[in-house]
Image (spheres, helix red, strand yellow):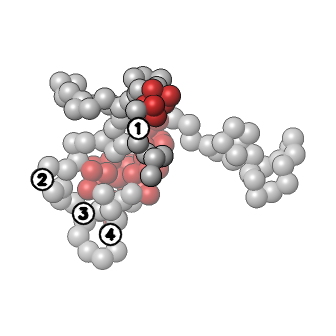
Amino acid sequence: MYHSERNPLRKITRDGERVKVPKGLRVRRLHKAFLRYHDANNWPVLREALKRMGRADLIGPGKHRLVPAWQPAGTGEQHEGRRRPASGEKRTTPFRTQHTGLPDRAKGRAGSKRGAR
């Protein structure tokens, strides 16, 4: 569905039903924010989107509201799923794989006593 933009719930043909697939970063983040509406870091994005959609009635206190009108202290500044540290922050431990600095498997097993009983 993502690549072909065809509806997988219908018969897939050349003239088959087309499905709009959001591929832009902003739209994908907005969809993720709606899925994780309970996370306070997503509330500013959701408030803005709900106002643009004309659904400001879903903002505020109460049982039938999606997000509250207030923002808890210390939330809302950090983006969901940030992969790199923010500018000025230093990563404490680098992520290492076999391609970026893990010891060779053969060398690591030679001195190991794992298999011996």
Q: Residue furthest left?
A: 73
Residue holding disc 4: 65
- How far apart, in angstroms, are the residues tagged by discs 2 and 4? 20 Å
Q: Residues within 10 Å of mark 3 (few under 14, many from 20)?
A: some
- How far apart, in angstroms, are the residues tagged by discs 2 and 1? 50 Å
- How far apart, in angstroms, are the residues tagged by discs 1 and 3? 56 Å
| Mark with earlier residue (1, 4) | 4
Using residue 94 as the reference point, say whether residue 29 is left or right of it: right
Residue 61 image position (x, y, % from top left): 23, 70
Q: Are marks 1 and 4 in contact (CB under 8 Å)?
A: no
Q: Amino acid at mark 2?
A: Ala
Viewer-nearest of labels 2 and 3? 2
Viewer-nearest of labels 1 and 4? 1
- How far apart, in angstroms, are the residues tagged by discs 1 and 4? 58 Å
| Mark with earlier residue (2, 4) | 4
Q: Quadrant of residue 93?
A: top left
| Mark with earlier residue (2, 3) | 3
Q: Amino acid at mark 3?
A: Pro
Instruction: Report helix, strand or loop for mark 4.
Output: loop
Q: Disc number at residue 68?
A: 3
Using residue 91 as the reference point, say whether residue 82 is left or right of it: right
Residue holding disc 1: 112
Is residue 65 visible in the rendered image? The answer is: yes
Viewer-nearest of labels 1 and 3? 1
Which sits in the foreground, 48 or 34?
A: 34
Q: Residue furthest bottom?
A: 63
| Mark with earlier residue (1, 3) | 3
Residue holding disc 2: 73
Viewer-nearest of labels 2 and 1? 1
Which sits in the foreground, 108 or 38?
A: 108
Instruction: Report helix, strand or loop for mark 3.
Output: loop
